[in-house]
Image: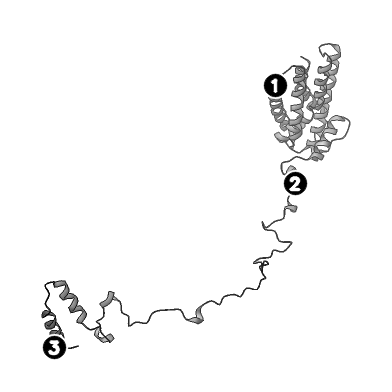
């Protein structure tokens, strides 16, 4: 479109009888023809976008092909099928040790230690006695305190306090006497298991009165039983041949205190 044509259209618009300037502008816009070619539209017009450039799109060959559905209705194909020997957590629970064994509680060893204490003339197994098993001693201390409770004596604090002091003293003494040394848990385990005959003495106190000659004889017998069993176990576990009497004497002092609590 030439400049002369634009001037003719503006002259025609001015001759239209109207007093509204906005109407004149509308008429002028309507008379302007729409460009029919891309050359008449300058670059940067219509929102600053060049429509002459081709639009980007993905080629059909670059798209990922969709996997066909091979399963049946109500029976979809599983994405992952674990083998029977494979575990979800990487290890089988059958290979793990039992919970009681992880906690250090072995009922077979507890029973063997109990029989060793009840049978003083039986030879002790040093490998079993060298274990730090505190399940049996805790049960025997609790049973001893419960038996004293039946006679009206609430002595749980004395039982556990004297046991702790006695274990500490025997631990220091045995480490000085033996060449290999011993752990505190082993000493506490042996002394706790050998407390079992003292429960019998406390049981006699529930039925009979131990404050007499009969009570003194039973108490002396129980003290000798406990100290002999403890010294036998210490000798076999620490390889202290010929020193059983030296070990039995401090054990007798410890169990004598428990006997005094039971009698009086």
Question: Is tag 1's residue or tag 3's residue first in the polypeptide sequence?
Answer: 3
Q: In 3D space, how far apart are the residues under numbered discs 1 and 3 (Cα atoms)?
A: 125 Å
Coordinates of residue 99 in the picture (x, y in percent): 73, 44
In the picture, the disc for residue 229 is none
Tell me the residue at 11%/83% (across/down).
11
Q: Earlier in the sequence, mark 2 or mark 3?
A: 3
What secondary structure is found at the residue carrying circle 3? helix
Question: What is the number of the mark on residue 4?
Answer: 3
Which badge, 2 or 1, comes first in the chain's sequence?
2
Secondary structure of residue under mark 2 = loop
Q: Which residue is mark 2?
A: 98
Q: Residue furthest top?
A: 212
Quadrant for residue 148, please give it: top right
Q: Nearer the viewer, mark 2 or mark 3?
A: 3
Front in this rendered view, residue 56 or 251: 56
Q: Which image quarter holds the N terminus?
A: bottom left
Foreground residue, 8 or 210?
A: 8
Q: Can residue 250 be seen in this snapshot?
A: no
Closer to the camera in the image, 80 or 195 = 80
Nearer to us: label 1 or label 3: 3
Instruction: State the residue at coordinates (73%, 51%).
Output: 96
SS of the residue at dot 1?
A: helix
Residue at mark 1: 158
Marks 2/1 in contact by CB < 8 Å: the verdict is no
Q: Residue furthest right?
A: 121
Quarter of the image for residue 3 reads bottom left
Residue at the spot x=83%, y=38% of the render?
125
Percent position (x, y) of residue 80? 66, 65
What is the crowding at mark 2: few (fewer than 14 residues within 10 Å), some, or many (at least 20)? few
Distance from Cα at disc 2 to Cα at disc 1:
35 Å
Q: Quadrant of residue 221?
A: top right
| Vertical comparison of 220 with 9: above or below | above
């Amino acid at each position: 479109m030439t400049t002369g044509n634009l001037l003719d259209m503006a002259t025609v618009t001015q001759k239209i009888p109207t007093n509204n300037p906005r109407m004149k502008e509308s008429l002028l816009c309507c008379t302007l023809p729409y460009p029919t070619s891309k050359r008449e539209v300058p670059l940067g017009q219509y929102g600053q976008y060049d429509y002459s450039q081709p639009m980007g799109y993905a080629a059909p060959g670059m798209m990922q092909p969709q996997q066909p559905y091979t399963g049946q209705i109500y029976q979809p194909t599983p994405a992952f099928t674990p083998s029977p020997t494979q575990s979800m957590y990487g290890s089988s629970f059958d290979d793990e040790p039992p919970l009681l064994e992880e906690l250090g509680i072995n009922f077979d060893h507890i029973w063997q230690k109990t029989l060793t204490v009840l049978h003083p003339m039986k030879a002790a197994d040093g490998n079993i006695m060298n274990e730090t098993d505190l399940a049996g001693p805790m049960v025997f201390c609790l049973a001893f305190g419960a038996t004293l409770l039946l006679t009206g004596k609430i002595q749980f604090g004395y039982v556990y306090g004297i046991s702790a002091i006695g274990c500490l003293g025997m631990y220091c003494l045995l480490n000085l006497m033996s060449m290999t040394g011993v752990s505190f848990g082993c000493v506490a385990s042996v002394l706790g298991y050998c407390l079992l005959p003292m429960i019998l003495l406390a049981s006699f106190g529930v039925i009979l009165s131990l404050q007499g000659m009969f009570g003194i004889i039973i108490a002396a017998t129980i003290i000798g039983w406990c100290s002999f069993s403890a010294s036998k176990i210490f000798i076999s576990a620490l390889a202290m041949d010929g020193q059983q009497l030296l070990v039995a004497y401090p054990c007798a002092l410890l169990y004598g205190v428990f006997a005094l609590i039971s009698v009086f």
